Image (tube, rainbow, N blue to C red):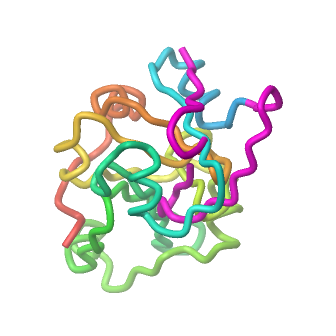
Amino acid sequence: MTQTSDEGHGHEAQGDGLHGSGQHHPGQEEIPPVAAVLAARGIPHRVFRHAGPVRSLEQAAAERGQRPEQVVRSILFRLEAGKYAMVLVAGPGRIDWRALRRHFGQSRLTTASGEEVLAVTGYPIGAVAPFGLRQPVTVLVDERVLAQEEVSMGSGVRGTAVILRTADLMKALGAVEVGRFQA
């Protein structure tokens, strides 16, 4: 069941968990696309809307009543022409580029541009999640995500997040590879 939180300082952000320009208009809230996908799959979650712009991962976490490592960033990488992978990482940690290149057997990887992120996922940077994507992508989960009981991530709309139990996130993802992709 989708729940909307109107408590605390606000009502999110994600992809990288940072960018939000949330405008809260009581009674005029639409269900964010990621929340709609989770609801259709029967995955328990709640929607959090930030009251104003989100300028840092730490701010996003604090407003959601979470620690920074509970904010999951969904980072899109370009592998080769037309091929992309998304890595879910916990909090502000850095990507372990060597581990990622080794995993994909490639000597060179790059993060996708803002235009590519929007084209592949359908979501702007700052609102990305691994659900309801325009194109299929390989999804990897850093093991540190699993260390959290509850996480938040992009909802498909800037200024809004979905919050769910990590076990429910993994259930929604299905068969994905978990590894050490964060430095």
In percent of width and height, residue 165 lies at: 33, 29
Q: Nearer the viewer, residue 141 or 105?
A: 141
Q: In this view, does 63 lie above or below 55?
A: above
Q: Residue furthest right?
A: 28
Q: Nearer the viewer, residue 104 or 76?
A: 76
Which residue is at a point 56% across and 54% down the rendered structure image? 13
In percent of width and height, residue 111 lies at: 48, 76
- Is residue 82 covered in magenta? no
Which residue is at a point 63% across and 52% down the rendered structure image? 159
Magenta-drawn stretch, dominant element (helix, strand or loop): loop
Image quarter hosting the N terminus:
top right
- Left or right: 8, with 11 as reference point: left
Picture quadrant of residue 58: bottom left
Which residue is at a point 60% across and 48% down the rendered structure image? 50
- Left or right: 93, with 158 as reference point: left
Picture quadrant of residue 49: top right
Image quarter hosting the C terminus:
bottom left
Please report the bounds of the magenta region as a residue range: 1-30
Q: In this view, does 118 lie above or below 167?
A: below
In percent of width and height, residue 65 lies at: 38, 43
Q: Which residue lies furthest to the bottom in this view?
A: 108
Which residue is at a point 29% across and 51% down the rendered structure image? 67
Q: In this view, does 82 lie above or below 123?
A: below
In percent of width and height, residue 134 lies at: 67, 48
- Is residue 10 covered in magenta? yes
